[in-house]
Image: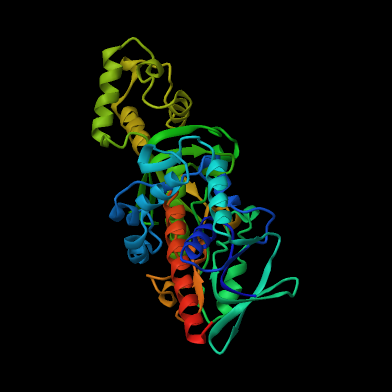
Amino acid sequence: MIYDVVVIGGGPAGLMASVAAAEAGASVLLLDKGDKLGRKLAISGGGRCNVTNAMPIDDLIRHIPGNGRFLYSALSAFNNHDIMSFFEKLGIELKEEDHGRMFPVSNNAKSVVDALLTKVKSLNVDIRVNQPVQAILNKEGSVQGVKLVSNEKIRALTVIVAVGGKSVPQTGSTGDGYAWAKACGHTITDLYPTEVPLLSDESFIKQKVLQGLSLRDVAVTLVNPKGKAIQTHRWDMLFTHFGLSGPAILRLSQFVVKAFKKFKVPHLEVQIDTLPDRNQEDVFQWLLHLAKESPKKTLKTAWKGIVPERYLMFLFEKIHLSPIMNYHELSYEKCREMAHMLKAFPVWVSGTLPIEKAFITGGGVSLKEINPKTMASKKMAGLYFSGEIMDIHGYTGGYNITAAFVTGHAAGQAAAKEACESKSRLGR
């Protein structure tokens, strides 16, 4: 048998590509090297599955800093609201949470995976798990099918590569697709971790002084070696036993990776602003006012609630200010120092966790060699890409999964169309 479309990879991009191709009338085979489909979907959004983001398209693109503009064509055909409608038609009721994130009302990623698999099976897509692919077969610049590690050859008119990047390898994303793409004439841009925790060898980190402490709605800023701000992100963050994590830090991480590469320094400074809606002078006056309002109370009591107590006590120690002093004992100098620490506490970072520990892979198949409307290869007829294998990456918050679904849908439709036209030419 010759399949119209073979999809390699059973993640969000591959599942959506299978659905789109089958709905367009193609005979589809979905291959995955693991024992079950949708493994990355099942752990996304902390096990709740953040299926997309409800932001307007331009805002959505801005949250995909890794070549998001490439998606404009595909989004004009199938966008984030189409993704929502798609899941609601499958019986998955969705709800919107902070920052536009869309989750199933069930708060259960398994319900999303199950609905997708039910849809795929209803379209008579052939599914084969535990089938690792060794190579994409091609002849004279055109795809012929795939060869499995078992040496079995499967013939196909088109092939969609949707195997993800190198991050979260336990879900099957181990970078297999880059070698296949390269063998088909494609360029692979430098791979690097994005959406990844930062490492620090600061003594307070090593001594786990703040381990497990979350700071809500802070602004974290990466500064260059001359002290100039490179990038700021505002959201929550977390101190860990090895460094810094949490949404704001994950968003900052790709800029940290690029800055290390550019400046070739052993450490870079990240500043934590716990009061991003106030300027430093305002914070100084506020601290002074709170202390003066209760002049006999200790500073620890007067300033209670400004930030979590554990962090406040840590800052007292950092600037050598006694928390049991009162207003009458407080110098302007120490008050200004505390204001500065609340606005720009410096943490020296030494790098990031490796790409395997990242949520998303930066880099991938060069977009110059892919048609943005169809996801078709410009190097090999019948070859398509979708999802994280391409040089596209966004922040966490439903942006990467949106890119996966959108590119999967475009690739599936286009591959089915090409297969149909190919059969017409051949008179099948």
Most foreground residue, 408 or 197: 408
Question: Residue 388's spot in the image, x, y percent?
Answer: 50, 61
Spot the residue most to the right: 150
Spot the residue most to the bottom: 140
Most foreground residue, 400 or 309: 400
331, above or below 369, in the image:
above
Rendered residue at 34%/17% (across/down): 329
197, above or below 376, in the image:
above
Spot the residue most to the top: 296
Q: Is residue 67 left or right of residue 157?
A: left
Most foreground residue, 230 or 120: 120
28, above or below 195, in the image:
below
Rendered residue at 51%/85% (across/down): 427
289, above or below 42, in the image:
above
Residue 296: quadrant of the picture = top left
Q: Is residue 381 visible?
A: no
Question: Residue 21's spot in the image, x, y percent?
Answer: 49, 65
Question: Residue 369's spot in the image, x, y percent?
Answer: 44, 77
Q: Is residue 286 visible?
A: yes
Residue 211: quadrant of the picture = top right
Quarter of the image containing the N terminus? bottom right
Quarter of the image containing the C terminus? bottom right
Most foreground residue, 195 or 243: 195
Q: Is residue 226 left or right of residue 136?
A: left
Spot the residue most to the front: 427
Q: Which colour style is shown? A: rainbow
Question: Residue 88's spot in the image, x, y percent?
Answer: 43, 44
Label total for image: 0
